[in-house]
Image: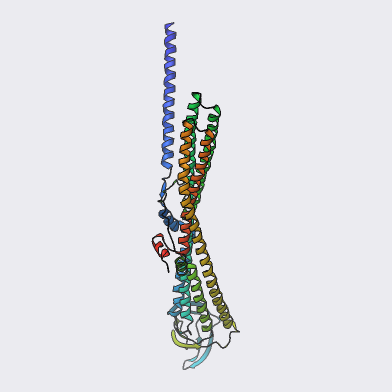
Amino acid sequence: MRVTERASLHTARGGVFFVATSLGLLCVLLLMVVCKADAQQPEALRLTLPEAVALAIENNYAVRIADEIIYERQAGISEAKAANRFQLSLQGAYSRLGPQTAFEIPTPQGTEFVEIGADEHHQYGLSLYKSLYSAGRNQALVRLSRLNVDISELQAAVTQRQIALATTGTFLGVIQAQQLADVAQQIVDSAAEHWRIAKARYDVGVAPQFDVLRAEVDIANAQQNVITAQNAVDLGKTVLKRILAVDVTTPLEIVPPPEPSVIDVAPMACLSLAQSRREEIILVQKAADAAQVSMRLARAARGINLDLVGAYNRHTASGFSSDYDWNVTLSLSKPITDGGASRARQRQAYHQLQQARLTCEQLKEQVASEVWEAYLKLEEAKSKLQATEKTTEQAQEAFRLAEVRYDAGVGPAVEVTDARVALTAARTNHVNALYAYQLAEAELLSAINVSADELPLASEQE
């Protein structure tokens, strides 16, 4: 009997040891997996609004493509300048010839056959070309290339401003979503506190069960709003990551900007700044300059051309020539007629100039309309922001009084619910008004093309 008991005890101890060892190994494996997952988790990217804008301008594909266009146009300047420089080329050739040509020459020893040429021929040499006068064609090509660079730089600046505004709007949208999520969570916490009070009153028999059930329903509804608000935050961050051109799996931490100070701007100063600073207007003016240069280029096609041409060649000597030759030539040419092609190009350039001038006037009106709309939008957002600040304070006080009245047993539960609904609406309206004001300010700054530091320029009365 004792042997059997000892065997059973030994078996039980062995089983316990096996189970403990297995659990220990499992814990180690789980710990290794967790540590590995933590090691692979990318570091969170923490950004303020200026940092986000700078990162977007650095990484965004549209901005990078615009930069590459600038580099391409800059290379075009060197290509245009090459027309005025010396051009040197090397060429060579090797040939086998046949049949051989010969003739007889009488000599004191008798008739001798003399071959003309050889059965193989090689030639190599240098050629030199220099345009001395082109009736302004070469200068026009260089000028046109420089204008193309200016236009591409202005287009890149427009792209950067658009990306900066898109980044700002998306960044502020994420802040708005986060603040709405905070409002939703505050409502959950408030509903939970009301449930606690209602439950305590119900337990002592001074409140009906309906109050407890209604509080539980309020909590459940508020939690749904928290989930929806948090999903909006995640979606907003995803859009922002795409603008920033960062990996979608990178954790993003947004640093809210400080509370904005309400600004006063002068609409006429804003309009004046926009007309002088918007790159689109300057870009169209550059396009008009390019059209004028194209007209000069078309006229130059019918002008006089003076070129210097030279060559030095080495080749197989023959019976009547040496093994080298050279030449220098001044070439003067003047097209008589090209079938009207140059005049047609000149007319095309003229109409391009007229299009650019009309587009410039149209764009000035469009910019003025954009600035005026942005100004009106800012004024509206300013009024709403100031109004919601006062409304939120009043709703907060009304909710506090409703809770006090219910806790004291002199107010109904529905009064607390109504006050909470009003407070939620007030807080939500304030968050939306704050976002609308910040976005309106950013849009006005973009419309007049000034930075926040230059904003006092838009406040100067004319």
Question: What residue do we see at 44% from left, 79% from top?
Answer: 87
Question: What residue do we see at 46% from left, 48% from top?
Answer: 390
Q: Where is residue 214? Give x, y as percent.
A: 55, 32
455 left or right of 299?
left
Q: Nearer the viewer, residue 196 or 181?
A: 196
Q: Where is residue 391? Give x, y as percent.
A: 48, 47
22 vs 395: above or below: above
Q: Is residue 149 in sight in this rendering?
A: no
The type of colouring in the image is: rainbow
Question: What residue do we see at 49% from left, 80% from top?
Answer: 121
Q: Nearer the viewer, residue 223 or 350?
A: 223
Q: Nearer the viewer, residue 383 or 241?
A: 383
180 vs 367: above or below: above
Q: Is residue 377 in sight in this rendering?
A: yes
- Count all numbered tags in the image, as a single digit: 0
Q: Where is residue 345? Give x, y as percent.
A: 57, 80
Q: Residue furthest right?
A: 339
Give the quadrant of the N terminus: top left
Give the quadrant of the C terminus: bottom left
Q: Residue furthest top?
A: 1
